[in-house]
Amino acid sequence: MTNAPQPEYKGPKRVFSGMQPTNGLHLGNYLGALQKFVRLQDQYECIYCVVDLHAITTGPDPENLASRCREVAAAYVAAGVDPKRSTIFVQSAVREHTELAWIFNCVARMGWVERMTQFKDKAGKDAQRSSVGLFDYPVLQAADILLYKATHVPVGEDQKQHLELSRDIAQKFNNDHDAPNFFPLPEPLIQGPGARIMSLRDGTKKMSKSDPSDMTRINLTDDADAIMSKIKKATTDPLPVPESKEGLADRAEVENLVGIFAAVTERSVDDVLGEFGGKGFGVFKPALAETLAAKLSPIAAEMRRLTADTATLDAILKEGADKARAVATPIMAEVRDVVGLWRA
C-alpha cells in the first residue's frame, strides 16, 4: 500500500522511539538503541518513551512496573539523552496513546496484523491463549509513533515489519479521510553496527533480557568483575581471532564478540581484526572486557544515582509527559475532527 504516491510531508522532522520496562537493560539495548538515541538529538526533535502499556501485554508484576519505568528512564539519561533537549516520559502518562490506538484499530485490517511475525514468535504454540493486547501490540506501536507525527523511527531488523504496518495505517487513514498529508509515513533509521548484539553463549540468538541465564548478556548495571567473568566464559572456539572478515564465516560467536568490540569502540570490524587477527582469545577477551567496563561503568554509576533519587527522576518524567502532551493533544484534537467524533 505504501508504494502509492504520497505528498511530501511539510511538518517538523521528529524522531520517536521507546523501550519496554521489562527485566533489566543490557549491552544490546545500549549499542542497538541508547547510543543511537543520544546521537539523534543532534539532528532531530526527539521523543523517547518508556512503553509501559506495551509491557503489560505480557503481564509483568504490577508492584515492580513503576520501578522498571524509572530504571529505563535512568538509562536514557545516564547514556546521554538530555531531558532538556529531548522528551522523556512514560507512555501511560499520555492517554492519547490509547485513544489513537483504538481509532487505528478501526483503520488497520486483520490480515495486516496477522502477518506480524513477532506475535507468532512471542505467542508460540499458545497463540489462542495470548492476550488480544499482545496481538494488537503493533497497532498501539503505530499510535505511539503517529500521535506525534514522527517522521523517523530508529529500528532494528526485528521491528522493520512493525514500522511498515505504521506506514500502511498512516496512508490508509489519510486516504480514507481525504487528508493526503495528515500523517507522515515514518521512515526507518536503520541502526547500523551494534544494532543486533547476540547472546554470549549462542551466537545465533539475540542477546535478551528474558533469557534465564544471566551469563548470556552484559547488563548495564554489571560491574567490571561481572563483565570480565562473562566475557571470559563467552563461547568461542579453539582457533585464533581471524585476520579478515572472511574468517568470521561460520564462527557466529566470534563474529559477535568482534562486532561488540567494534561497536563499543566505534571502529570498523576490519580495524579490530587488524589489531587482534591471529591472536588468541586469551588476549582478545581481556581487552574486550576492559573496554566494555570503561564504557559501561560510568553509565551504571549514573543509573544507580538516578534510581536512588526518585524525586529528580520523577520530575524529569513529569516534565517530559507535559512536553509530550503539548504535542499530542492538538494532534489528537485534529484526529477527532477528521474522524468526526463528538467533541464536547
Image (cartoon, rainbow, N blue to C red):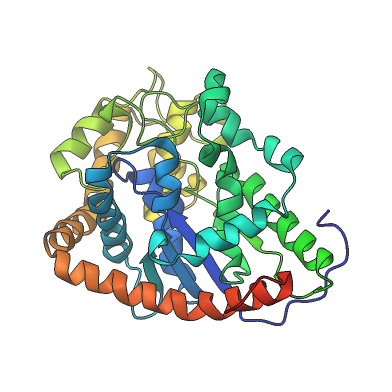
Q: Nearer the viewer, residue 99 or 217?
A: 99
Indicate whether 210 appears above or below 26. above
What residue is at 56 percent from the left and 28 percent from the top? Answer: 121
- State the image coordinates of residue 138 (x, y, percent, origin top left): 59, 47
* 46 displayed left or right of 297: right
Indicate whether 207 appears above or below 310. above
Tell me the quarter of the image containing the C terminus.
Answer: bottom right
What residue is at 13 percent from the left and 62 percent from the top? Answer: 305
Q: Is residue 181 visible?
A: yes
Q: Is residue 153 visible?
A: no
* 338 displayed left or right of 251: right
- State the image coordinates of residue 282 (x, y, percent, origin top left): 26, 29
Most distant residue in the right direction: 5
Indicate whether 210 appears above or below 322. above
Q: How many marks?
A: 0
What residue is at 57 percent from the left and 68 percent from the top? Answer: 147
Dividing the picture into quadrants, the one containing residue 72 is bottom left
* 173 displayed left or right of 193: right
Dividing the picture into quadrants, the one containing residue 142 is bottom right
What residue is at 34 percent from the left and 43 percent from the top? Answer: 22
- State the image coordinates of residue 243 (x, y, percent, origin top left): 49, 35
Dividing the picture into quadrants, the one containing residue 75 is bottom left
- State the image coordinates of residue 29 (x, y, percent, origin top left): 39, 48
